[in-house]
């Protein structure tokens, strides 16, 4: 019978590993990655940055939103090898020393979350939106943040 | 509840009576299903306050009569009730060597504010600042708690904290009295108050023994108690115990496309004393979003040949996004309930959801003249 061993189970001998350089939250990282590994799994499983959440893993819920070169992306639908050389900012990287990011503080002040699972994605998405210059009206924020679902119904508190 | 509240609305229109007036004329002072009185029921206040807030009396009650640009506008209201549950919960309460209060209980916090309100309740009972209370929770090795759900947690674990605190206070006073040269030696429970991290005489607050001093005099041994808090079932058997709510909703229906938007909703809740208005408000407004979801969006679709769900993913099983949620307002009616439990509280979770779907369906009728007796209500139901 042909050898059908799964290369995932035998990473060392599998020659498909690729060198990927990522600057994550200001820190240069050199990684050896299989080409099909998502950026989300790199963050959570390889680098232990579990602030970024895995919701649906389908690009439907927005929980995994991070900033890539300043733009908000769904890390679950992004292959890490395609982002070689990119600058990634996650929820762990937005704090300034001990000073919460103003959006983090605003979320706390407005009780804008309950379980908190969608919150890192909501905040990264909001930072991206501000950078895009599109957060001018409540309606704009509502519309352009709608890729970030919240099951607790903290919607209007967040917006 | 949905069927009853939509039928009440239909009846009101058939009789030519305002739906709110129909409910006020038939207002139940005792629970019609058991003929027992309510421990408290400030539903009338809920109706009045929510109706005022949304401007109920200013609407034209004629179905299909109100417009805003290319939208039909409709107003609807409905009532909600939810059982005021209370379950047993065991509390271990400890005064530590630093004079802080540690509360141990297995309860979890799924984001409802349990950690915050339990800390508040414990701090209030022992007269300690919030930062001197350690609420330690979320571990089944800790003393028993029921599941986090049923809008029951604050009544269950919160009231159990009050009961445990009562025992602990008694113990602390006994220890304080036995201290050498104790200024409280002759004091009885009625003479003292618990504040500023210790025990003071009511009529002379300068007489004060700190918890820390009591623990030190106790040879450094922490002072603790364990107490199972339970509802007063015998007393409560004579009453109906309910949380009440009224939701008033404004919908907009696109004249051509028939798309439905809940443009504004007000829910007034009577749930006894509110421990934390901020987290309670978040609970109710979250429930209102679930109400919008139930009325207009959420639907499991089954492939009847295969017997499988065909939309088991977040792209096809729709829940409200930020763009679907507009102005939501929450009111808490004043409601004093001396019967229900030591804190006079009832749950604030699901009660925000109960009335919403019926209020939305009733508002869609007011906007369009069409009564849709199924959920969720989609635009295609309204197409000519």
Image (cartoon, grey):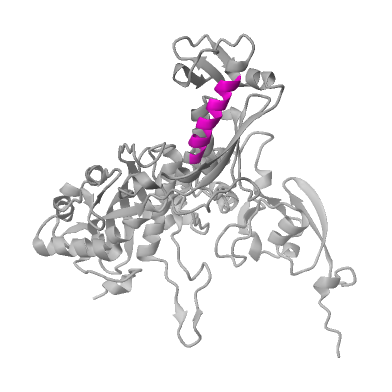
- The residue positioned farthest toward the bottom in the image shown: A1
Would you say B254 lies left or right of B19 here?
right
Q: Where in the figure is residue B42, as x and y percent of width and height?
A: 26, 43
Q: Quadrant of the N terminus of chain B?
A: bottom left
Q: Position of residue B151 (x, y in %)?
A: 44, 50
Residue B163 magenta: yes
Q: Quadrant of residue A46?
A: bottom right
Residue for point 50% across, 31% down:
B166
**B83 above or below B172?**
below
Residue B332, how many percent across, how many down? 33, 41
Residue A95 visible here: yes
Is B134 one of the magenta-colored residues?
Answer: no
Q: Residue furthest right?
A: A13
| Quadrant of the rendering where the C terminus of chain B is positioned | bottom left
Q: Nearer the viewer, residue B72 or B31?
A: B31
- Residue drawn at 87 percent across, 72 percent down: A14
Q: Which residues are magenta?
A: B160-175
Front position in the image: A104 or B214: B214
* Residue B71 seen in this snapshot: no
Comparing B22 with B143, the one in front is B143
Q: Is residue A38 left or right of residue B100?
A: right
Q: Name the main secondary structure of what is drawn in magenta.
A: helix
């Amino acid at each position: 019978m042909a050898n059908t061993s799964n290369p995932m189970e035998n990473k060392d001998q599998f020659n498909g590993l690729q060198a990927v350089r990522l600057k994550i939250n200001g820190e240069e990282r050199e990684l050896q990655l299989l080409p099909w590994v998502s950026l989300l799994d790199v963050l959570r499983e390889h680098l232990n940055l579990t602030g970024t959440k895995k919701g649906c893993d389908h690009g439907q819920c927005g929980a995994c939103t991070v900033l890539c070169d300043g733009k908000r992306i769904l890390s679950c639908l992004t292959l890490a090898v395609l982002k070689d050389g990119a600058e990634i900012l996650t929820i762990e990287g937005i704090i300034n020393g001990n000073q919460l990011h103003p959006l983090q503080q605003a979320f706390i002040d407005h009780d804008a979350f309950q379980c908190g699972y969608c919150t890192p994605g909501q905040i990264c998405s909001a930072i991206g939106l501000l950078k895009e210059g599109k957060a001018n009206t409540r309606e704009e924020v509502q519309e352009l943040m709608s890729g970030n679902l919240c099951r607790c119904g903290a919607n209007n508190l967040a917006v | 509840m949905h069927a009853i509240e939509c039928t009440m609305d239909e009846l009101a229109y058939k009789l030519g009576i305002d739906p709110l007036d129909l409910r006020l004329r038939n207002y139940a002072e005792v629970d019609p299903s058991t003929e027992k009185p309510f421990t408290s029921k400030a539903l009338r206040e809920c109706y009045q306050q929510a109706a005022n807030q949304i401007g109920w009396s200013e609407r034209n009650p004629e179905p299909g009569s109100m417009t805003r640009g290319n939208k039909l506008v409709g107003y609807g209201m409905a009532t909600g009730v939810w059982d005021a549950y209370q379950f047993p919960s065991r509390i271990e309460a400890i005064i530590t060597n630093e004079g802080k209060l540690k509360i141990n209980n297995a309860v979890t916090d799924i984001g409802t504010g349990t950690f915050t309100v339990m800390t508040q309740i414990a701090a209030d009972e022992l007269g300690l600042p919030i930062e001197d209370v350690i609420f330690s929770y979320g571990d089944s090795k800790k003393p028993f708690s029921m599941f986090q759900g049923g809008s029951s947690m604050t009544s269950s674990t919160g009231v159990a904290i009050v009961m445990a605190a009562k025992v602990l206070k008694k113990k602390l006073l006994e220890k304080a009295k036995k201290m050498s040269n104790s200024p409280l030696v002759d004091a009885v429970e009625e003479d003292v108050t618990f504040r500023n991290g210790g025990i003071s005489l009511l009529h002379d607050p300068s007489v004060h023994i700190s918890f820390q001093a009591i623990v030190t005099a106790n040879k450094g041994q922490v002072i603790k108690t364990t107490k199972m808090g339970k509802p007063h079932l015998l007393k409560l058997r004579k009453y109906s115990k309910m949380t009440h709510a009224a939701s008033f909703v404004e919908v907009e229906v696109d004249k051509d496309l028939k798309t439905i938007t809940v443009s504004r909703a007000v829910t007034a809740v009577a749930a006894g004393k509110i421990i934390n208005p901020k987290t309670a408000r978040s609970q109710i407004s979250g429930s209102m979003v679930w109400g919008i979801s139930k009325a207009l969006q959420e639907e499991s679709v089954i492939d009847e040949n295969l017997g499988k769900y065909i939309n088991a993913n977040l792209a096809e099983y729709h829940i409200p996004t930020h763009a679907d949620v507009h102005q939501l307002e929450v009111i808490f009616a004043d409601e004093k309930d001396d019967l229900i439990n030591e804190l006079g509280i009832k749950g604030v979770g699901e009660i925000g959801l109960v009335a919403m779907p019926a209020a939305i369906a009733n508002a869609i009728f007011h906007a369009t003249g069409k009564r849709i007796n199924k959920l969720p209500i989609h635009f295609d139901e309204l197409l000519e």
